[in-house]
């Protein structure tokens, strides 16, 4: 098992170490996306709120990515649809083409975007996809579903009633979330009258409440809990941000609203629970901080949440990281972006991560979208984007760094050594000393820090050894470990 050292529950004491993002290496644009042929294509491929799935063995294995193909011609925006790319190794991707859809409502005119695709227990694919457009002269902005046998040709499963409503279908910007303009006006008039003592505001209708509980932004990611089979949706809920609020930024496209992260669950994947608020900006965040989306990755008993870190004043989108044991209670050990924007490159203004990391042996591969335009540029920003790849060590999402401190130290909580060797994933630029202790933190003779055989350099598995002999004699014994380092970043112990 692996003991991640960023987790305070795994430590009895810590001094001088601070949590930092792990070393993530950018691999550049997806091959072919910057070629002359790609530039001549009418489609701009956008991985935001897209996803990556393992390709079925009968399809040759490898990976399949579902992204959004936005038409570059503003007059052809209604033709935008989910798009499939495929890869044998997770690094090199080839375009397959637009996803086919059958049984779409004949009276719907608009586009589909942001596909979140799952494999169901019967082998079929379900796509959660956002519909934006018009229907019988009314605005449509809602989350629906489609079903497929092969993951390429889908037929509509759920459109009306929708899974969720985007607030654009319920209201226009500037009105109270969950209300149509007329209802918002009436509510405001009633509230004013109530304050004057002339009448009590009437209770909301059941229909209004039923609609209001489904309000959302169109940044949603849907997952399947492998232990329970439950469908879990992470999305955005809006808080009111009225005139005079210190958090209001007039340059935002939704200046009267604030974005926070919510979680919903479902047994059948079609009817979801009430939203549960799981992540909001806190006292360490600037007032213009908002959270745009949460993409989930599960590993070693943790939920790693890749967080859309939206700074409204700067109109930039960074890739933050949150951690949870259960997917409900989240914390943010570090506030620095996991993947840094390059001011001179294709991701100078925004980075958005697709769902699901790609297994590459000792590493994870990340498919992301970089943009060069500020957030509040409407659909224009979707047409000037680049799909790119990055690589990070499997247990290097968050490290504990000495940050210039001399002799930073930590003592682990009691652990049970489940293998003969004790190894440490670490980058040791300076020096590292380790001391093997009993479960109470008392040093074991022959395994004190002065008995430690030094290790240095960058390794996923530094073998910790002492002059007292091999650690195999402690196999299945309760122990703890004291680490002392200068100029080093420590990630995880394999125990």
Image: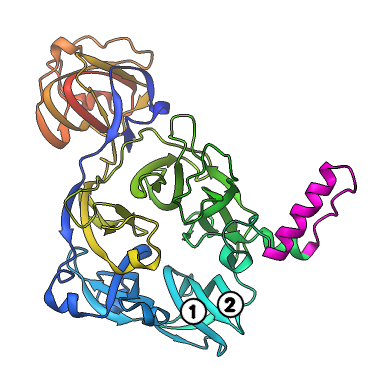
| Residue shown at 43% from the left, 34% from the top | 285
Task: Give the crowd class for mark 1: few <14, some 14-19, many >=20 residues within 10 Å.
Answer: many
Q: Does the magenta run of residues contain 187?
A: yes
Q: Return the disc, 1 or 2, that comes first in the chain's sequence.
A: 1
Q: Mark 2 points at which residue?
A: 159
Nearest the eye: 478 or 296: 296
Q: Name the residue furthest right.
A: 198
Q: Quadrant of residue 411?
A: top left
Task: Give the crowd class for mark 2: few <14, some 14-19, many >=20 residues within 10 Å.
Answer: some
Magenta part of the protein: which range? 181-206
- Coloration of the structure image: rainbow
Q: In which quarter of the image is the C terminus?
A: top left
User: Dot 1 lies on which element?
Assistant: strand
Q: In this view, does 132 lie above or below 230?
A: below
| Residue 454 in the image, given as x and y percentages of width and height | 10, 21
Q: Quadrant of residue 431?
A: top left
Nearest the eye: 78 or 494: 78
Q: Name the residue under label 1.
A: 147
Q: From the viewer's perspective, is 479 left or right of 273?
A: left
User: Dot 2 lies on which element?
Assistant: loop
Nearest the eye: 235 or 344: 344
| Residue shown at 20% from the left, 11% from the top | 448
Nearest the eye: 495 or 431: 431
| Residue 230 in the image, given as x and y percentages of width and height | 55, 59
Q: From the viewer's perspective, is 352 left or right of 244?
A: left
Q: How many labels does the image show?
A: 2
* Mark closer to the observer (1, 2): 2
Residue 410 appears in the figure: yes
| Residue 231 in the image, given as x and y percentages of width and height | 53, 60
Distance from Cα at disc 1 to Cα at disc 2: 12 Å
Residue 124 appears in the figure: no
């Amino acid at each position: 098992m692996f003991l991640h050292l960023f987790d305070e529950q795994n430590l009895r004491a810590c001094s001088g170490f601070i949590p930092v993002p792990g070393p993530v290496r950018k691999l550049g644009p997806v091959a072919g996306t910057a070629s002359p042929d790609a530039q001549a294509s009418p489609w701009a491929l956008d991985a935001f709120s897209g996803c990556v799935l393992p390709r079925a063995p009968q399809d040759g294995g490898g990976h399949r990515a579902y992204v959004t193909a936005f038409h570059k011609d503003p007059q052809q925006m209604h033709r935008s649809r989910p798009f499939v790319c495929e890869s044998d190794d997770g690094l090199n991707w080839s375009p397959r083409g637009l996803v086919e859809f059958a049984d779409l409502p004949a009276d719907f005119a608009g586009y589909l975007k942001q596909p979140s695709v799952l494999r169901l227990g019967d082998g079929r694919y379900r796509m959660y996809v956002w519909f934006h457009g018009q229907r019988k002269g009314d605005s449509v902005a809602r989350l629906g579903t489609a079903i497929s046998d092969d993951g390429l040709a889908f037929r509509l499963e759920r459109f009306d009633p929708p899974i969720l409503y985007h607030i654009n279908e319920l209201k226009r910007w500037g009105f109270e979330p969950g209300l149509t303009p007329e209802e918002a006006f009436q509510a405001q008039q009633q509230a004013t009258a109530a304050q004057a003592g002339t009448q009590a505001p009437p209770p909301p209708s059941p229909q209004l409440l039923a609609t209001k509980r489904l309000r959302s932004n169109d940044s949603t990611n849907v997952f399947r809990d492998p232990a329970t089979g439950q469908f879990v949706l992470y999305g955005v809920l809006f808080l009111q941000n009225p005139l005079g609020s210190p958090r209001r930024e007039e340059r935002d496209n939704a200046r009267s609203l604030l974005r926070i992260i919510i979680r919903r669950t479902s047994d059948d994947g079609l009817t979801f629970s009430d939203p549960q608020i799981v992540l909001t900006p806190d006292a360490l965040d600037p007032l213009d901080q908002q959270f745009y989306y949460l993409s989930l990755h599960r590993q070693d008993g943790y939920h790693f949440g890749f967080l859309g870190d939206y700074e409204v004043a700067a109109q930039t989108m960074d890739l933050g990281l949150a951690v949870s044991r259960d997917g409900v209670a989240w914390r943010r050990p570090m506030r620095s972006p996991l993947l840094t924007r390059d001011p001179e490159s294709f991701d100078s203004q925004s980075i958005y991560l697709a769902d699901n990391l790609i297994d590459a042996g000792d590493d994870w591969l990340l498919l992301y979208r970089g943009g060069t335009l500020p957030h509040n540029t409407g659909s224009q920003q979707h047409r000037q984007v680049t799909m790119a790849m990055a690589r990070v060590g499997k247990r290097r999402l968050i490290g504990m760094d000495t940050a210039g401190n001399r002799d930073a130290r930590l003592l682990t909580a009691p652990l049970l050594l489940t293998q003969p060797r004790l190894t440490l994933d670490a980058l040791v630029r300076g020096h590292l000393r380790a001391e093997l202790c009993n479960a109470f933190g008392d040093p074991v003779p022959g395994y004190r820090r002065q008995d430690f055989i030094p290790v240095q350099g960058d390794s996923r598995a530094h073998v910790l050894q002492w002059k007292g002999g091999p650690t195999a004699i402690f196999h299945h014994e309760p122990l703890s470990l004291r680490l002392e380092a200068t100029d080093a970043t420590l990630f995880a112990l394999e125990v």
